[in-house]
């Protein structure tokens, strides 16, 4: 039993953390081996494992105590277990188990009240020898939630139900279940973008996006104490960013916790999906200890921020057969309908530790379901040089174009797709999508600061062109007439020149930095 549980835990971590050699020990994962304790004259340890039934969303948690010298599961155990969620005891009780394994099934329901019923699921042959296979079936609305579940476990007896321990052996366990949160960003430049954050530790709150710093922010409860950190092997957060969200498709990222910049090794980027880039934030125990030592004040939460470290535009994808990886950039970085664009890329061999390789490929571009460009070639194996192909983006291109690589290395299974965001043009000075931003501000769907952040970015990128320059007179308050002017322009009741006069005012008064 113990080796099977260990294998399940290790395999589950490999799926998410293939880059890691750490064992699955401690709070924050779906499998946990607790530190040994003395039970009489021998050392025992507790294993806690979990699995989710996707058809019912029920969560099964298994507890098993074993002798650390022999590896044999301790039988005829009486446990007292408290199940804790959001710092509240959800249910508790004394539970006997003949084979040493105790199973909790946490089933979601629509009832605010939590019910817990103990059942003996022993089969025919188990009954013949008097063995018990105990399952505690609990249900309630609280079990719809993922995140961290804590268990306070006291061993009241072992090897004999009547042989009560004078001082119960105590274990504290924490098992995490993935919980996704989707946050919709109305970006000034790239429109509506759905960013998904998946937590493998505790429930998230305050998910947001700062358009000026391009930071995705989110928070979760956390006990900053030495005992809790010593029992927390890893905190794993996963941020999924659409590849059409050009502002966040960069070559490097940084992240912070409670305002402290994280070590570089805490971030890994996964470009295996053709539609989304996934950034993993991995806080191992050593990093948590470092953060604990730096913080003077110990808050009761973790405030995350993920943001670009570099402005270099870079997309990436891996072929379907996981043999090659493509990195791609464009010139200009932000492309519009009708632009002449240079698409530059490198091809790497995944199994040669990312070495650039010279291989044949078929290259094509698709817009609105139609192939608009196609060519073939052989890539360079130079680390410094890029393969560049010049294409014209159709004037009627909308949302994005898709770059396709096929038959890479002469293998029909080596194919990959990379979407690139495209902005359609309407006016030489002011692209039409900026009106969407003005409408959102007018309807209070975004704040004034978000509106300014979007305008500032567009001015810096030379998308909005104006000759205005900052003056010595600075102000922080957006005048009411600016919003009224923007609302009128969004409704086509004001001219482009009137709107630009408002932008010029914002620049001259320091509210839009250039």
Image: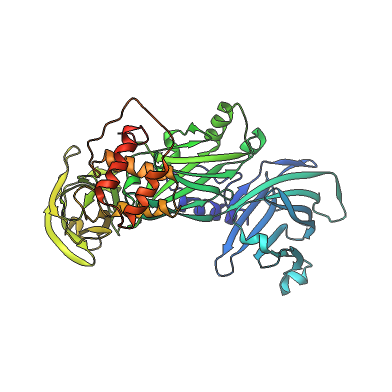
Q: Nearer the viewer, residue 474 or 360?
A: 474
Residue 244 shows in this picture: no
Image position, residue 391 (x, y; %): 13, 54
Image position, residue 496 (x, y; %): 25, 50
Taking the spot 19% from the left edge, 62% from the top edge, the residue there is 396
Q: Quadrant of the N terminus?
A: bottom right
Q: Quadrant of the C terminus?
A: top left
Q: Nearer the viewer, residue 338 or 406?
A: 338
Image position, residue 83 (x, y; %): 72, 54
Taking the spot 41% from the left edge, 39% from the top edge, the residue there is 478
Counting labels gives 0
In the orientation shown, which residue stands out farthest toward the bottom? 124
Q: Nearer the viewer, residue 186 or 20?
A: 186
Image position, residue 463 (x, y; %): 24, 45
Quarter of the image where one finds residue 291: top right
Residue 452 shows in this picture: yes
313 shown above or below 434: above
Q: How is the image coloured?
A: rainbow
Taking the spot 87% from the left edge, 51% from the top edge, the residue there is 163
Q: Nearer the viewer, residue 99 or 381?
A: 381
Is residue 137 toward the left or the right of residue 202 in the image? right
Quarter of the image where one finds residue 170: top right
Is residue 414 toward the left or the right of residue 38 in the image? left
């Amino acid at each position: 039993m113990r080796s099977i549980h260990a294998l399940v835990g290790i395999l589950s971590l490999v799926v998410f953390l293939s880059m890691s050699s750490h064992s699955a020990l401690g709070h924050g994962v779906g499998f946990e081996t607790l530190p040994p304790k003395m039970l009489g004259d021998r050392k025992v340890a507790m294993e806690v494992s979990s699995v989710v039934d996707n058809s019912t969303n029920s969560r099964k948690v298994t507890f098993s105590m074993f002798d650390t010298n022999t590896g044999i599961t301790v039988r005829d155990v009486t446990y007292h277990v408290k199940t804790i969620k959001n710092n509240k005891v959800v249910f508790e009780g004394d539970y006997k188990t003949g084979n040493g394994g105790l199973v909790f099934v946490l089933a979601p329901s629509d009832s605010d009240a939590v019910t817990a019923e103990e059942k003996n699921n022993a089969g025919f042959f188990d009954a013949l020898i008097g063995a018990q296979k105990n399952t505690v079936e609990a249900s309630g609305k609280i079990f719809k939630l993922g995140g961290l579940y804590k268990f306070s476990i006291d061993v009241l007896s072992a090897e004999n139900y009547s042989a009560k321990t004078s001082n119960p052996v105590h274990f504290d366990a924490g098992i995490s279940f993935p919980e996704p949160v989707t946050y919709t960003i109305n970006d000034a430049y790239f429109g509506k973008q759905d960013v998904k954050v998946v937590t493998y530790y505790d429930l998230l709150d305050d998910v947001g996006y700062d358009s000026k710093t391009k930071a995705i922010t989110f928070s979760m409860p956390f006990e900053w104490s030495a005992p809790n950190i010593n029992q927390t092997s890893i905190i794993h957060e996963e941020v999924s960013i659409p590849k059409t969200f050009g502002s966040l498709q960069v070559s490097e990222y940084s992240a912070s916790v409670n305002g402290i910049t994280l070590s570089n090794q805490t971030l890994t980027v996964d470009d295996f999906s053709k539609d989304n880039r996934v950034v993993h934030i991995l806080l191992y125990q050593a990093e948590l200890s470092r953060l604990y030592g730096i913080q003077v004040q110990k808050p009761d939460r973790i405030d995350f921020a993920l943001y670009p470290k570099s402005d270099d535009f870079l997309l990436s994808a891996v072929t379907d057969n996981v043999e090659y990886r493509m990195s791609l950039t464009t010139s200009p970085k932000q492309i519009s309908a009708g632009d002449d664009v240079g698409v530059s890329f490198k091809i790497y061999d995944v199994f040669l530790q990312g070495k650039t390789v010279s291989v044949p490929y078929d290259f094509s571009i698709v817009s609105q379901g139609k192939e608009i460009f196609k060519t073939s070639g052989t890539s360079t194996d130079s680390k410094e040089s890029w393969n560049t192909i010049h294409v014209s983006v159709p004037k009627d291109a909308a949302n994005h174009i898709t770059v396709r690589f096929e038959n890479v290395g002469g293998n029909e299974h080596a194919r990959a797709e990379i979407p690139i965001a495209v902005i359609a043009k309407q006016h030489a000075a002011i692209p039409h999508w900026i009106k969407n931003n003005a409408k959102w501000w007018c309807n209070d769907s975004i704040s004034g600061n978000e509106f300014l952040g979007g305008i500032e970015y567009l001015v810096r990128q030379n998308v909005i062109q104006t000759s205005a320059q900052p003056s010595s007179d600075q102000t922080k308050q957006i005048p009411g007439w600016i919003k009224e002017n923007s609302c009128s322009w969004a409704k086509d009741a004001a001219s482009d020149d009137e709107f630009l006069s408002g932008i010029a005012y914002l620049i001259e008064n320091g509210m839009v930095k250039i």
